[in-house]
Image: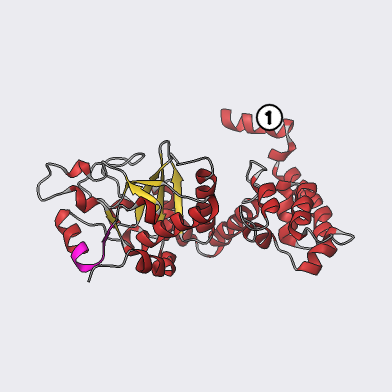
Amino acid sequence: RRAAGFARRRRDVDERYDPTEALDGAARYLGIAQPRFGREDLAVASYHMGIGNLKDVIDAYVAPSRPARTTSATVEERDLSFSQLLFDSSPLENRRTYRLLAGFGDDSRSYLFRVEAAREIMELHRDDPEELVRLERLHAQWPSGELVLRPPEESEPFADPGALRDAYDAGDLISLPNEPKRLGYALEPGLGRFAAGSEGSHPSLYRGLRPEAVATLLFITKEVRRVAGHADLRVTDAVRDPAAPAGAGEPPGAFSPHATGYAFDIAREYGGPRVGPAFAYVLERLRALRVIDYVVERDEIHIGVGPDAERLLPVQEALVPEPE
């Protein structure tokens, strides 16, 4: 009752919290923005970013060419979509556009995709509520969408050190080389040290990943090097078994993606000021492509690798070939 009272008072103070007023306001805004941009996706993106800010982004993207007389004409001539503006800009290509998009400091870049996700949720609620419940359960189990990419029932964890040994022998796990100069990452010196003294265990068992995860790690370091000039990332966690201690942010006894070999952690300490932003850029793009999802923790970034990482396997095969 008290919460309902607060909600009523909030609606009285700020009409954005009144559903009817908010919908009317959004419709009026989109009625203005749609003709300005000539596309629904750009109009929706501008709802959060602002019409003027999005116009600046478009003008920067078409530079050094002069924009057309109106923004909608520029969009039509270039057949521009918001996805093109976002994904065709990077720290190396269309840099001014990238700096503008990255500089808003809010959810402007992802707002359109959040709206589309909300639309999907409403469609599932109407057409397939059981699937919506399943997805909600998976999202609730982990701080990111990692378990949606690889549900626990489809990714059997390695049960014990013996299972890890068998996986290495079968090529289902690959030991991570510790060659920072060549590969752009280093292994945390204490990686796998928790295994010391455990029966049948050895730290080396916990210094590997599935081939798809190795490929993803190598692709990340390659792209960070391309953007920043060097990588210098540090792997702090790799494969584990359920008997291993829980990692940072993991409740003891809970399912851990690390136990499947499809997850690894990178320290949030970078070898230079350009590496962190480059790393964030690469992670964001891989997440958008549903190759990974990740969680930013206090000291580490936890990265979970989805099935689409299979496309990156040529990187692993070229740089870290499996032993014959």
Q: Quadrant of the N terminus?
A: top right
Q: Residue at x 41, y 66 (%)?
A: 315
Q: Residue at x 44, y 46 (%)?
A: 295
User: Is residue 170 magenta-colored?
Assistant: yes
**Residue 280: image x %, image y %?**
52, 48
User: Is residue 215 magenta-colored?
Assistant: no
Q: Residue at x 31, y 42 (%)?
A: 247
Residue positioned most to the bottom:
324
Residue 245 at least partly seen: yes
Tell me the element at label 1: helix
On the image, which quarter does residue 107 sit in?
Answer: top right
**Residue 61: image x %, image y %?**
73, 58
Q: Residues within 10 Å of mark 1 (few under 14, many from 20)?
A: few
Horizontal side of residue 194 vs 178, given as left or right: left
Q: Quadrant of the C terminus?
A: bottom left
Q: Count how many numbered circles sit on residues in the image.
A: 1
Q: Nearer the viewer, residue 220 or 311?
A: 220
Q: Which amino acid type corresponds to the residue marked 1 in the rendered image?
A: Arg
**Residue 62: image x %, image y %?**
77, 60
Q: Nearer the viewer, residue 147 or 134?
A: 147
First to last magenta residue range: 168-175
Residue 144 at least partly seen: no
Horizontal side of residue 243 vs 118, given as left or right: left
Residue positioned most to the right:
69
Q: Is residue 57 above or below residue 15?
A: below
Q: Which residue is labeled 1 in the image?
A: 9
